[in-house]
Image (spheres, rainbow, N blue to C red):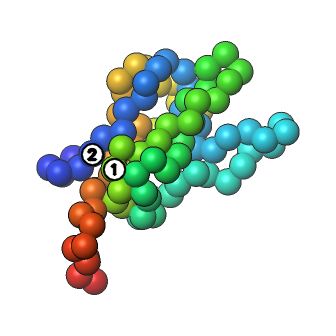
Amino acid sequence: MDEGLVLIQSPRVGYFRRSRTIKGKRAPPSCKEKQIVKEGQVLCYIEQLGGELPIESDVSGEVIKILLEDGDPVGYGDAVIAILPSFPGIKKLQ
């Protein structure tokens, strides 16, 4: 992994979900690689005992890598998503 990336970690044990279930159906994934996200935005969910806990981003930036596949078991503190933080006011050169 590159230096400077922020790793979003799971706050609990469960199963990694890229989206939530609404009325028995899977919603579209909450985030995709290369997507720009804001601090506090829900990135994914951890499923545990039938409930789904939303995982929010600690930073604003670009999703570089989603580290798990949908349904993968996840442990406390496991990295689930890598984000390259953006700095307000600095425009990225294309």
Rendered view: 67 above or below 14: below
Calculate the distance from the C-alpha at mark 2 to the C-alpha at mark 1: 8 Å
Asked if one can make out residue 36 in the rendered structure from this viewpoint, the answer is yes
- Choose top left, top right, bottom left or bottom right for residue 9: top left
**Callout 1 crowding tier (Cα within 10 Å): few <14, some 14–19, many ≥20:** some
Label pair 2/1, CB-CB below 8 angstroms: yes
Whole-percent x, y for residue 19 in the image? 63, 44
Q: Quadrant of the C terminus?
A: bottom left
Which residue does the numbered mark 1 point to in the structure image?
59
Name the residue located 28 percent from the left edge and 56 percent from the top edge. 84
Locate residue 34, reporting x and y percent: 41, 64
Residue appearing at x 25%, y 73% in the figure: 89
**The residue tagged with tag 1: helix, strand or loop?**
loop
The x, y position of residue 80, in whole percent, is 41, 37
In the image, 89: left or right of 57? Answer: left
Q: Badge 2 is on which residue?
A: 6
Kindly identify the amino acid type of the residue bearing the numbered disc 2. Val
Say left or right for 7 vs 76: left
The residue sitting at 30% across, 41% down in the picture is 7
Q: Earlier in the sequence, mark 2 or mark 1?
A: 2
Front residue of 35/53: it is 53
- Residue found at the far right of this picture: 23
